[in-house]
Image (spheres, rainbow, N blue to C red):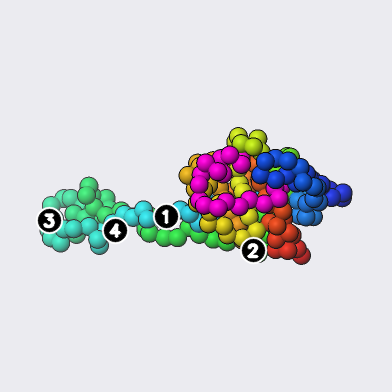
Amino acid sequence: MSERKEPIELNVVDTSNAEVGRVALPAVFGGRVNDWVLFEQVVAQRASRRRGTAATKTRAEVRGGGKKPWKQKGTGRARAGSTRSPIWRGGGTTFGPQPRSYAYRLPKQARRAALCSALAQKARDGEVRVIDGISLEAPKTKDLVRILSALGITGSVLIVLAGTDKNVELSGRNLPRTLVLPVAGLNVEDILRHETLLVTRPALAEIETRLAR
């Protein structure tokens, strides 16, 4: 897909959904959507979360098998040195899974391209909302629910703040379809799996600074 030439402008609202101005989204929201790099980044993120704790025992780790089952010659049977051979029941496993890390990272430019593509896709789908700011006096989930209800957000939502805000983060933690992240923690998978991207006005400036070439 080609890049958008004209800037995307959106209304800025407050916590009561009253319009308080308009803002032009950073250029990354109008960039090209690269489906391949989006897919690769999501796979990399999910691979990094795999526990990798599956384990099987080799023949050296299985208990027993120290005695030779029968003598080497004269029985007419195949030679056997241990009852813990992989071909025996109760024996070790050949080439079985061992604890390992599945994590890997794409190159820096590919990670940046994936993040820009995810933001551009949300803007293209009309799923980006801009709020002037979100602040709570105390970590209360009901206060955050009230704000989201006033904004008309009923589905899953990713709230992006310029920095960390413990009150907002703790308020959203009890909502299964709500996630609060600072710009520094913004990632492709969380952007794509939430229906609405709710960004504060200061966070927009931070996104532009971090993703500027």
Q: Which residue is mark 1?
A: 51
Q: Identify the image quadrant of the C terminus.
A: bottom right
Badge 2 amino acid: Pro
Residue 198 on the magenta segment: no
Residue drawn where x is 15% and y is 61% of the image: 66
Quarter of the figure with residue 197: top right
Q: CA distance from mark 3 to mark 2?
A: 57 Å
Q: CA distance from mark 4 to mark 3?
A: 22 Å
Q: Residue 107, which numbered label?
A: 2
Q: Residue 2, which numbered label?
A: none
Residue drawn where x is 37% and y is 55% of the image: 53
Which mark's residue is nearer the viewer, 2 or 4? 2
Q: CA distance from mark 1 to mark 3?
A: 42 Å
Q: Position of residue 10 (x, y in %)?
A: 78, 45
User: Counting residues from the N terminus, which is met first, the one under dot 2 or under dot 1?
Assistant: 1
Q: Position of residue 176 (x, y in %)?
A: 50, 41
Q: Secondary structure at mark 2?
A: loop
Asked if the residue under mark 3 is in contact with the one under mark 1, i.e. CB atoms within 8 Å, the reply is: no
Of 132 and 161, the residue lying toward us = 132
User: Counting residues from the N terminus, which is met first, the one under dot 3 or under dot 2?
Assistant: 3
Of 203 and 167, the residue lying toward us = 167
Q: Which residue is mark 3?
A: 70
Badge 3 amino acid: Trp
Q: Which residue is mark 4?
A: 58
Q: Is residue 65 left or right of residue 166?
A: left
Q: Which residues are magenta?
A: 130-148
Q: Residue furthest front?
A: 137
Badge 1 amino acid: Arg
Which mark's residue is nearer the viewer, 4 or 3? 4
* On screen, residue 89 above or below 207: above
User: Counting residues from the N terminus, which is met first, the one under dot 4 or under dot 3?
Assistant: 4
